[in-house]
Amino acid sequence: MVLSGVNLQRQTLQLYGELIARRESWAGQLVFLYGAGASATGLPAAVSIAGGTSLVLDADSAAVRSVFRQGGVDFVVNTLDEALRVVKNEIRKHRPLSVALEGEVHATIAEMRERGVLPDVQVSVGDTAEPKAKLGAENLQLTWEGGALVPSELLEAWLMERGWYEMVLERATTRELRELDAQLLSILPEEDAQRRTWIQRIGHYQRVVAGGARVVWLTKLERAATEGSGAV
């Protein structure tokens, strides 16, 4: 599951939506993501932007390191002990954090069961994942086709209720992108924490791929306000 540029940012926004459509605040919540290439899905960044903590189990060392260099995860560890020590502290403090654990999926899940690790939500990705490997958590079933996420009916209904539509805004330079962020924040209502938080945080978690574009949700009126400003 290799994505880059706008596609990764689009997927991350979609995953962010899947989370906040289910729960307004993810502070103090642990999301467990596992499977081949799981770290490259954008979900770790989505969880952090939503305010939660994620533990990503991925046997693909190259993918994990690549995501870490881009800023998509905060820490990379090699043992479950290290991972749990880091995430427990941040969950207690209700601070967002993403930790990627390099390890064999089935063996690590078995160890987590033995140790009574109970994430709040778990998401499986790829052929090596175990959809039935419940760890006492809500098992969030997401559908992946060809490396792309298929929006759930819940997310589609949630966006439709708000009148939000996906829009891609491209800019040539970092300065222009910062100006775009400021423009978007001036357009969005002050009380709209969900979309404002996305705009404020995505550049941090995807420093490389988010450098030339913003994928955002806008209403038709908000879209009209950006006409002629690089929308595609």
Image (spheres, grey):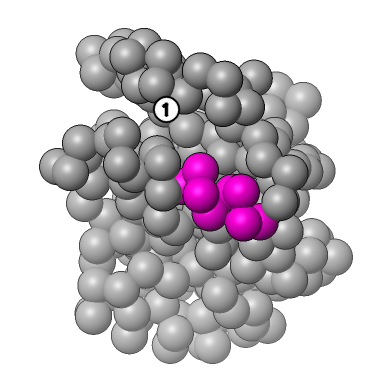
Q: Of residues 197 and 127, which is closer to you in this image?
A: 197
- x, y percentage for residue 42? 60, 48
Q: Is residue 182 left or right of residue 213?
A: left
In the picture as drawn, the residue positioned furthest to the front comes out as: 228
The residue sitting at 21% across, 51% down in the picture is 25
Q: Is residue 91 visible?
A: yes
Magenta range is 174-181
- x, y percentage for residue 114? 45, 72
The residue sitting at 17% across, 43% down in the picture is 190
**Residue at which label 1 appears:** 217
Quadrant of the image containing the C terminus = top right
Q: Is residue 143 visible?
A: no
The local secondary structure at tag 1 comes to: strand
The residue sitting at 31% across, 34% down in the picture is 187
The residue sitting at 61% across, 49% down in the picture is 176
Determine the image quadrant of residue 39: bottom right
Quadrant of the image containing the N terminus = top right
